Image (spheres, helix red, strand yellow):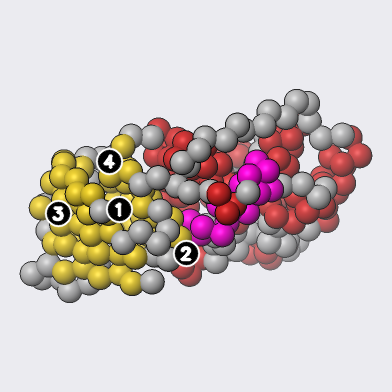
Amino acid sequence: MKTTATNPTEPTCLPCLSSKSQGWENILVEQFQHPSGEGKTHYSEEHTICLSLASRPVRFLQVKGGKTHTSLYGKGDISITPAEMPFFARWEGDDHYLQIRIASRFIQQVAREALAINPDHLELLPEFRTRDSQIEAIGLMLLTELQQGNSGSRLYIESLANVLAIHLIRQYAVTHPQIPIYEGGLPQRQLLQVLTYINDNLEQDVKLADLAALLEMSQFHFSHLFKRSIGIAPYQYLLQQRIERAKQLLKHSDQSIMEIALICGFNSHSHLGKQFRQLTGMTPKAYREN
């Protein structure tokens, strides 16, 4: 893979934020800000989505798939470049955007497991400039996680990656597959199996793939049925249970808040504090003293 960019004052386009250090699987998210210039990319194993965050429209010339496109690229505009497709751009004005690179092997896995599609026949179409409210929403949620450095939210990131993969396959594949509709939820036995696993592993890095594997189903299928069963997504349930465990320890133990944070699967005192305030309206210290 090769990425280069040139302009009069900055020889390379380096991200101001990157998820590389956060251990996210199958998806890389980076935020860029740089002045007028030009650049080229060629990712052989990743599909690339660029979401504009620019406060003012930027004039772009883009070349990919043997075609050239020139237009103003404003906040919320999206471009999609399939894996193995070289991309060149020249822009006039200060650019600010979010780049999402999602592994092509992951897209193929989702296509095979969730949609019963032969991955060898899966091909995504390039987009120079489009609007897509779902991709924009997912991108902004990923950006928030990136900015907050929530390395303890792996299940959340995996859920977003799965939703993004399904959306790309449904909307941007050469052939549009039918997305299966699953009625009902998980059988009680399977639901209890998953809830018990989560309860027994609150301090661990619980992964969506692990939960789905318990029931031998795709991550997309599992997430859908889980939400139908209890009304919230797996990552929301995991967070709720971690907070409930923290509340018990705050009231019934003399362990420090830092120790409780680690026991409950949070990576720091501040991470617990932020999530605790969002769900309870008070800090862990205030809850303990209340």
Q: Is residue 112 found inside the magenta-colored segment of the image?
A: yes
Give the residue at mark 4.
129
Q: Amino acid at mark 4?
A: Arg
Q: Amino acid at mark 1?
A: Gly
CA–CA distance in space, label 3 to label 2: 25 Å
Q: Could you classify mark 2 by the number of other residues whose Cα lies within 10 Å: few (under 14), some (14-19), or many (20 or more)?
A: some
Task: Return the disc, 3 or 2, that comes first in the chain's sequence.
Answer: 2
CA–CA distance in space, label 2 to label 1: 16 Å
Give the residue at mark 1.
65
CA–CA distance in space, label 3 to label 1: 19 Å
CA–CA distance in space, label 1 to label 4: 14 Å
Is there a contact, CB below 8 Å, between mark 3 and mark 4? Answer: no
Nearer to us of marks 3 and 2 is 2
User: Looking at the image, which is closer to me, 269 or 151?
Assistant: 151
Is there a contact, CB below 8 Å, between mark 1 and mark 4? Answer: no
User: Looking at the image, which is closer to me, 75 or 218?
Assistant: 218
Whole-percent x and y of residue 274? Answer: 53, 50
Give the residue at mark 3.
91
Q: Which residues are magenta?
A: 101-117
Element carrying mark 3: strand
